[in-house]
Image (tube, rainbow, N blue to C red):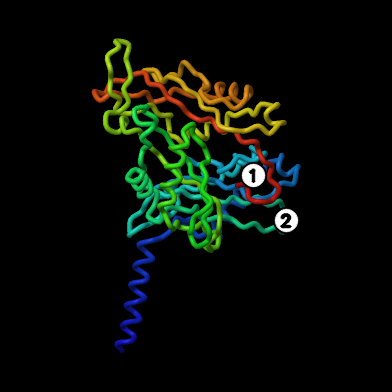
């Protein structure tokens, strides 16, 4: 009798722990998700004509309420119609089951595989279910970065703030290795510090395939950093009166960083010469965000090539008005910004994963 009670108690404890920690999911399970996509996909004619099959990976953030935000293709293919269709069918899902940690719903970055198979095809593709993540979630990761990032002494006083992305291999056990900066800055000491912080984490939650099995993959983590003067005194700019003003909030793209990357991706027209020569890289564009949010004084501060520089300026010039900077007393004020415009030569898909 005692043994039976012990077993029952163990099962109840295990069930309670599982209920407290659950991954995000489609409400009716992964098989129903695939059925939903199959029923709703409108196969693009361009992909049909070229007999293109494969998986398009859609990146999104599933918030604590189960709503998918910032839906975008993880890596643009050579078939924009296929990418757009994958985004469209994911947007048809009204609500997801959110991720739970310690019994509470939390935001999570998710990769949703959308499989494209031609009628009569017998091909099978492995699909990713969730992205490798910091064990305690994205919010805790951001706090970890803020606590451990040591701003380089050589750059203090120069008011350089921004975001770096660290690429790393994560095996099926969650062990990381082979670190690199995806968007190298002009300051090696910042790049090195971002990698150092990422190396402090000995184990990540591994990526899992659509059946829930651990999956070795290459992963990208975001490292935000702020100059000490931005944290302690905030950036100082000069208004028309030449009186110094302390900025309480920096300018921002409407909808946030992810919305800006989607805008850039969808408006990029790769220059023919650079495409032919397979020239790629990150062009950094500097500009001023005015009091009304308009962008002026655009200039390239980090060049890649004549064609890519011109295209970067064109794309930034197309952007809608930004949210302007505000001072501590609530006034809007002009502020200078620098953003990278990433150019990667499109790779065709041929039935293998796109990323």
Q: Residue at x 71, y 40 (%)?
A: 45
Residue occupying the point 55% across, 31% down: 282
Residue 265 horizontal/vertical position (percent) = 56, 33
Q: Residues within 10 Å of mark 1 (few under 14, many from 20)?
A: some
The residue singled out by tag 1 in the image is 42
Outermost residue on the left side: it is 329
Quarter of the rendering containing residue 47: top right
Q: Is residue 19 above or below residue 338?
A: below
Residue 242, image x, y percentages? 30, 12
Q: Where is residue 137? Give x, y as percent.
A: 39, 52
Q: Which mark is residue 71?
A: none
Under circle 1, the secondary element is: loop
Above or below 199: residue 181: above
Q: Which residue is mark 2?
A: 121
Disc tally is 2
**Which tag is nearer the camera, tag 2 or tag 1?**
2
Give the quadrant of the N terminus.
bottom left
Does label 2 or label 1 sit earlier along the sequence? 1
Q: Residue at x 70, y 26 (%)?
A: 273
Badge 2 element: loop
Seen in the picture, residue 134 relative to 214 is either above or below; the reply is above
Instruction: State the separation of the CA atoms marked 2 and 1.
Output: 16 Å
Instruction: Please state which of residues 194 and 164 is positioned toward the viewer in this rendering.
Output: 194
């Amino acid at each position: 009798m005692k043994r039976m009670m012990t077993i029952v108690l163990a099962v109840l404890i295990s069930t309670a722990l599982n209920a407290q920690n659950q991954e995000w999911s489609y409400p009716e399970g992964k098989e129903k998700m695939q059925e939903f996509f199959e029923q709703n996909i409108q196969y693009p004619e361009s992909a049909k004509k070229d007999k293109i099959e494969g998986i398009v990976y859609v990146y999104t953030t599933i918030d604590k309420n189960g709503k998918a935000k910032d839906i975008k293709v993880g890596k643009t293919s050579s078939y924009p119609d296929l990418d757009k269709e994958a985004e469209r069918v994911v947007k048809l899902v009204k609500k997801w089951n959110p991720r739970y940690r310690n019994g509470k719903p939390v935001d999570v970055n998710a990769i949703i595989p959308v499989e494209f198979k031609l009628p009569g095809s017998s091909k099978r593709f492995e699909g990713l279910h969730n992205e490798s993540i910091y064990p305690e979630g994205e919010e805790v990761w951001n706090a970890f970065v803020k606590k451990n990032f040591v701003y380089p002494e050589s750059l203090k006083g120069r008011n350089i703030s921004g975001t770096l992305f660290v690429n790393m291999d994560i095996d099926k056990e969650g062990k990381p290795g082979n670190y690199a900066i995806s968007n190298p800055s002009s300051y090696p000491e910042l790049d090195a510090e971002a990698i150092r912080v990422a190396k402090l984490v000995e184990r990540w939650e591994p990526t899992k395939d659509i059946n829930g099995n651990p999956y070795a993959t290459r992963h990208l983590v975001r490292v935000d950093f702020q100059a000490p003067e931005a944290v302690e005194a905030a950036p100082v700019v000069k208004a028309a009166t030449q009186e110094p003003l302390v900025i309480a909030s920096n300018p921002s793209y409407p909808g946030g960083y992810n919305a800006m990357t989607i805008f850039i991706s969808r408006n990029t027209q790769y220059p023919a010469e650079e495409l032919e020569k397979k020239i790629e890289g990150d062009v950094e564009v500097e500009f001023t965000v005015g009091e009304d949010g308009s962008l002026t004084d655009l200039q390239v501060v980090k060049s890649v090539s004549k064609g890519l520089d011109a295209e970067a300026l064109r794309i930034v010039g197309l952007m809608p008005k930004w949210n302007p900077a505000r001072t501590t007393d609530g006034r809007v004020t002009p502020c200078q910004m620098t953003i990278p415009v990433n150019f990667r030569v499109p790779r065709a898909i041929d039935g293998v994963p796109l990323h």
